Amino acid sequence: MRVNVGKRGRGGKRESVGNRERGGKRERVGKRESGGKRESGGKRESVGKRESVGKRERGGKRESVGKRERGGKRENVGKQESGGEQESGGKWENVGKRESVRKRESVGKRETGGKREGVRNRERVGKRERGLKRESVGKLEGGGKQERGGKRESVGKRESAGKRESVSKRGRGRKWERGGRVSGIERVSGSGRVS
């Protein structure tokens, strides 16, 4: 891209380069770089597109930047970087959705689909509106306690008595042996050893 852009710059595309050097496009370049395109490698591509095609930069590219700055792409950024939005609050939602997807699949193996409903209701308002569930949700979405002791304890609370027995029968021994850490739970559930 850079070679082509340079050749075009010698021709009629000097104006776009001049505009960027004057400062009008330099600000946009700064926004793009600070937005996170630098890490994904798309900054160079966007720079080439910006210099070669002016209308694309004014149209779709600015919209994409606007979405990222407004928060529309915040979820995508959180999913890709898996930690870029930790402090902003969006990371909790994204992590909850991501982990619920993981847990839904692995949990379906462990507890025969019983915890699958619990995980979905954990995100939704159904069980969250109940008194006990609200406390368990606070533990779950609070931060690190999500997958640690609070998560395993709230699993039994969140489900019915029958599901609680199945949890104690199937997963509890192995979970407490290996699942002292979040990575331990995910490793055990992902490999299918618990099932």
Image: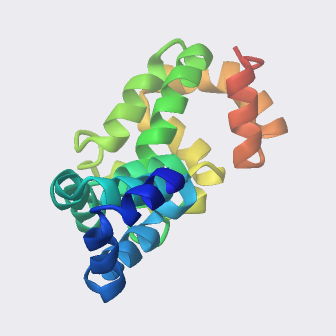
Quick check: 106 left or right of 119?
Answer: right
Q: Nearer the viewer, residue 12 or 36?
A: 12
Measured as percent of width and height from the top left, residue 26 is found at 35, 80
Measured as percent of width and height from the top left, residue 2 is found at 51, 56
Q: At 49% from the left edge and 57% from the top edge, which residue is drawn?
A: 44
Q: In this view, which residue lies farthest toward the right?
A: 177
Q: Nearer the viewer, residue 40 or 161?
A: 40
Q: How many marks?
A: 0
**Splitting the image into 4 quarters, where does residue 179 fall?**
top right
Q: In this view, which residue lies farthest toward the bottom?
A: 22
Vertical placement of residue 112 versus 123, above or below:
above
Vertical placement of residue 195 versus 150, above or below:
above
Q: At 36% from the left edge and 83% from the top edge, which residue is drawn?
A: 21
Vertical placement of residue 27 versus 89, above or below:
below
Quick check: 181 left or right of 16?
Answer: right
Quick check: 173 left or right of 143?
Answer: right
Q: At 49% from the left edge and 66% from the top edge, which residue is drawn?
A: 86
Residue 31 in sight here: yes
Residue 138 in sight here: no
On the rendered image, what quadrant is the C terminus found in? top right
Type of colouring: rainbow
**Splitting the image into 4 quarters, where does residue 176 fall?**
top right
Q: At 31% from the left edge and 74% from the top edge, which residue is drawn?
A: 28
Measured as percent of width and height from the top left, residue 90 is found at 37, 60
Quick check: 146 left or right of 59?
Answer: right
Measured as percent of width and height from the top left, residue 40 is found at 54, 53
